[in-house]
Image: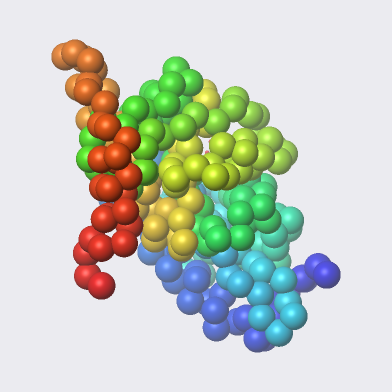
């Protein structure tokens, strides 16, 4: 069933998602993860009353200064525009593919953050040599295949790389990072922490060979951070 407009039963949820996704786009320049318009955030809106899922994403090529809730666009999980006056992000197909094939994912982020993109340019995974990596990524940050924007190639590469992998981040070769999360905020957090560890491990390698963390310690750190850390 295709959706040509936001169902009344989903209106409130879509509007709330627009507010969240608009606010989260401001986090990308805030944490220096983007230049110009080179990054995007989306969040799934689960279908209700028999209607299919939708997702909210930014319009393509629009300055972050202009990205308020009203500017956000709504798409179906095939990437078709359902609501909005401007073209959706050029990465909409990739976000849509992830939502179609990873039911537990409700947030997707793409940036070209400098240090993560530098690892992607080499097609080299970031080794798990920092406790922050064990905490958030549960091990190394993997590399996905080189894929040209414009069809399902990028989305397929994200899904094939991250399915069954602890990491919420993938370095798409020669392109840059994509992150996923239980919601858009979690995906933005993964993008922020990814750039931090990409930078730290890069700096460390300028001075020598970073020391790997034993797997049992990685497992223990990951379990603590994912299940105990913070306010419960
Ligand atoms: O990398 C690319 C285009 O090659 C995009 O991710 C980036 O420019 C952001 O595009 P959008 O403004 O989201 O359409």
The N terminus: image quadrant: bottom right
| Residue 113 visible within the image | no
| Residue 117 visible within the image | yes
> Of residues 19 and 53, which is closer to you in this image?
53
> Of residues 117 and 48, which is closer to you in this image?
48
Identify which residue is drawn at 36% across, 43% down: 138
Q: Position of residue 125 (x, y in %)?
A: 42, 26
Identify which residue is drawn at 72% across, 71% down: 52
Q: Position of residue 186 (x, y in %)?
A: 39, 58
9 to the left or right of 32? right
179 to the left or right of 51? left
| Residue 27, placed above or below residue 131 | below
The C terminus: image quadrant: bottom left
67 to the left or right of 94? left
Toward which corner of the image does residue 133 lie, by quadrant? top left
Q: Position of residue 113 (x, y in %)?
A: 37, 35
| Residue 46, placed above or below residue 138 | below
């Amino acid at each position: 069933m295709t959706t040509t407009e936001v169902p009344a039963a989903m209106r409130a949820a879509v509007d709330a998602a627009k507010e969240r996704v608009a606010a989260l786009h401001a986090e990308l320049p805030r944490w220096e993860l983007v230049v110009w318009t080179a990054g995007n955030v989306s969040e799934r809106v689960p279908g209700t009353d028999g209607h299919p899922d939708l997702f909210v994403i930014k319009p393509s090529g629009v300055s972050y200064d202009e990205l308020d809730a009203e500017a956000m666009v709504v798409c179906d999980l095939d990437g078709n525009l359902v609501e909005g006056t401007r073209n959706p992000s050029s990465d909409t197909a990739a976000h849509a593919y992830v939502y179609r094939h990873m039911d537990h994912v409700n947030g997707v982020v793409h940036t070209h953050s400098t240090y993560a993109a530098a690892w992607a340019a080499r097609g080299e995974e970031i080794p798990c040599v920092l406790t922050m990596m064990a905490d958030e990524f549960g091990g190394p940050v993997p590399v996905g295949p080189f894929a040209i924007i414009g069809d399902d190639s990028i989305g397929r590469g994200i899904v094939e790389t991250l399915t069954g992998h602890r990491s919420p981040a993938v370095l798409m070769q020669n392109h840059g990072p994509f992150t996923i999360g239980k919601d858009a905020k979690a995906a933005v957090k993964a993008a922020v922490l990814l750039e931090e560890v990409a930078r730290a491990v890069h700096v460390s390698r300028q001075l020598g060979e970073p020391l790997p963390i034993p797997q049992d310690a990685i497992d223990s750190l990951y379990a603590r951070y994912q299940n105990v850390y913070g306010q419960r």
